[in-house]
Amino acid sequence: MGQYHKIANLDKKEFLHPHKFGDGLKLLEFGSSGCGTMTGLAILLACHNNRGGGDLSSTNPIIGSWAGDRIAVVGDYGNEPGDKCLGVYDQLDSEEWTDISERVIEAMCEDAYLRQSFKESGVI
């Protein structure tokens, strides 16, 4: 079956859900995605954006909002004593955590190429 993963911001208690980006939950499924989860993560981590060609042409405040935070790719098998992110995956569905995937996708869709990619994949 395999292990499922999500990307968690341990400081803000926010996370990205790969399925919402049209990706699978297995590490290599979303890790090799061209315009999905990993692009969303890059936008969240961008310290500098909207300064030239190749940047996301947007001033959306979500861009760069994870820069400098503790980020982890957490798996559903992470329940063994000594795991660095012990039980975090299981906590993501609690009220303490917020799935910001749709907000990130909204910012990504300000780019025509990414918007078209999401349309073609059925995400939007």
Image: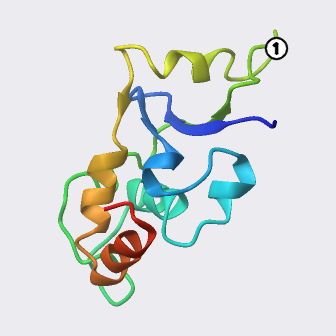
Q: Residue at x 75, y 14 (%)?
A: 79
User: Circle 1 — which element?
Assistant: loop
Q: How many marks?
A: 1
Q: Position of residue 73 (x, y in %)?
A: 63, 39
Q: Is the N terminus in the top left, top right, bottom left or bottom right quadrant?
A: top right
In-image side of 60 versus 86 (left or right): left
In the image, is residue 86 above or below residue 69?
above
Foreground residue among 103 and 25? 25
Which of the 4 image quarters holds residue 75?
top right
**Identity of the residue furthest to the top in this view:** 81
In the image, is residue 40 above or below residue 18?
below
Q: Position of residue 34 (x, y in %)?
A: 56, 72
Q: Position of residue 2 (x, y in %)?
A: 80, 37
Residue under label 1, please give it.
Answer: 82
Q: Is the C terminus in the top left, top right, bottom left or bottom right quadrant?
A: bottom left
Q: Residue at x 34, y 41 (%)?
A: 100
Q: Residue at x 47, y 61 (%)?
A: 42
Q: Residue at x 73, y 23 (%)?
A: 84
Q: Amino acid at mark 1?
A: Gly
Crowdedness near tag 1: few (<14), some (14–19) or many (≥20) residues, C-alpha within 10 Å? few
Foreground residue among 20 and 98? 20
